[in-house]
Amino acid sequence: MLGGMQDWEMRVSGLIDHAARAHPTREIVTHWADGTQSRTNWHDLRCDALRMVQALRRLDIYPEDRVATLAMNHARHLASWFGITGAGCVLHTINPRLFDDQLDYIVNHARDRVLIYDVAFHPIVERMRHRWPTIEHYICFDDPHHAVTFADWIAVEDGDALWNPGDERGPCMLCYTSGTTGDPKGVLYSHRSNVLHTLSMLQPACLAIEPRSCVLPIVPMFHANNWGLPWACAATGAKMVYSQVADAAVLCDLISAEKVTHVGGVPTVWFSMFEHMEGTGRPMPTFEMALSGGSAVPASVVERLMRGGIRVVQAWGMTETSPIATVTYEPPEWDAMTFDEQVACKSRQGRAVYGSEVRAVSLFDPFSEAPRDGDTPGALQVRGAWTVKRYFEAEEDTVGSDRWFDTGDVAAISAEGVVRLTDRTKDLIKSGGEWISSVDLENAAVAHPDVLEAAAIAVAHPRWDERPLLVVVRRPGGAVSVEALLVFLADRVARWWLPDAIEFVEALPHTGTGKISKKDLRLQFRDYRLPE
């Protein structure tokens, strides 16, 4: 016997339909690279997306064909998200910060047929065009001198079209991992997985996005589903503010002028914002929620944001989890906690949201679960309604029959299910048979007022196998010495965790998504010898 309720396919086109119907005049604001601004709304954005459906059909682009974007954050890019998926095609967002060989690989692996790009990336397009034989059509978002422009391309259409019908389990969006080990891997989201992920994000205990919200996603749209923020804002008709540039002064101005409530960015965003405020004497702009992810957020950053009256929501996830799997929502005892306890709570990665499950398995026995005591580290695994089952074009599932996906992260999980990341499995430092968490050591270092960034890597040692080397970037004007930093760390980490050496550098290498690249750092210090 079946239930008596209507079948209603969960497709992302339904999100923009709702936004245009229930919140038609709610704005989407774009701050362009040249300093100008433009404004549209959910009604007009839906019209542009429907025109794009017609334009794609005119090019003989069919459902499940891949249509790529090479672009930063702006309203035209947002319209393309709904136009491509609304046509039944697969949206493939490309990270322009990847190396040429990676760009070559992912476009050809995806077999993209159309590329829509920002003029800022025209040099990439010209350089790679001969290596992308599957791309038949090039369309520029914003410059008539280099190609057909997006606006001209869709302007000839009248928008009298219907979204492509299809199964909710059909493909919707393709995001590739950064390829830190081997070739990048494609994660093919479904309409269903994206809608379920969206519904989870709207919970007050998660991101609390609602019609009164004004959301500024600083995280790039090519990164991990843009954290699902475009879908979530459409589902609630929230106002969106996009900036093509990530300059701290511009972002602070936008937050104030547009009355932004939610800001989403990786930890480096907060570092640059703090640096801007310190250099100018400017106070913290007023907003309600700081959504942070991408890498662990140091307690010092959490504390500074919270002292500014901002609710901090640290989310953990990855491209393979769409990306949010856990968030630091406030526990029932929140109001009884001291401020320091609240900061400690928000400095962890939180608990799984409904629709996602996490566990940690022993680092020594992968067939047994690590104790849920909050201290014992284990290999973090996840499963759920929006977690990858099989990589795009892979011959086999990447998960077993129990559906657990191995994330590559190391975490300790408490009895209450609170996740605390301690490292990546390949970044752990094993000294004398004991594990040292590079993340905890780095977080302790950046708590020093003169430290801007820090990274800990393992260096070979004849007696202890490996010992930590701490690589540090001083804040402008900072003068902390090796000796002073060691004294500072001695009160914050176990004595045997103290680095055997500290090296000060002008800058740390970062990946295309803004994370510190430990792979490049290990390569840079591959011949390093610890002092006797």
Image (tube, helix red, strand yellow):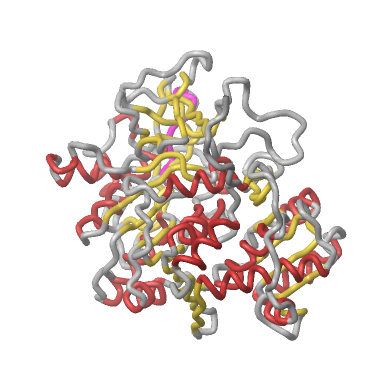
- Between residue 385 and residue 343, name the one nearer to us: 385
> Is 420 placed left or right of 317 in the picture?
left
Q: Is residue 467 magenta?
A: yes
Rendering coords of residue 30 (x, y %): 50, 76
Q: Is residue 531 visible?
A: no
Residue in view at x 49 percent, y 64 percent:
19
Asked whether 242 or 56 is in front, the reply is: 56
Judged left or right of residue 237, residue 497 is left
Q: Quadrant of residue 96?
A: bottom right
Instruction: Identify whether 147 is placed above or below 271.
Output: below
* Residue at x 45%, y 29% (from the top left corner): 358
Q: Nearer the viewer, residue 5 or 245?
A: 5
| Region in magenta | 463-470
- Residue at x-position 86% and y-position 64%: 130
Residue 531 in percent (x, y) is at 43, 38
Residue under the image location 65 percent in, 51 percent down = 173
Image quadrant occupied by the N terminus: top right
The prevailing secondary structure element of the residues shown in magenta is strand
The quarter of the rendered structure image containing the C terminus is top left
Residue 150 on image: x %, y %: 69, 76
| Residue 520 part of the magenta segment | no
Q: Position of residue 233 (x, y in %)?
A: 46, 60
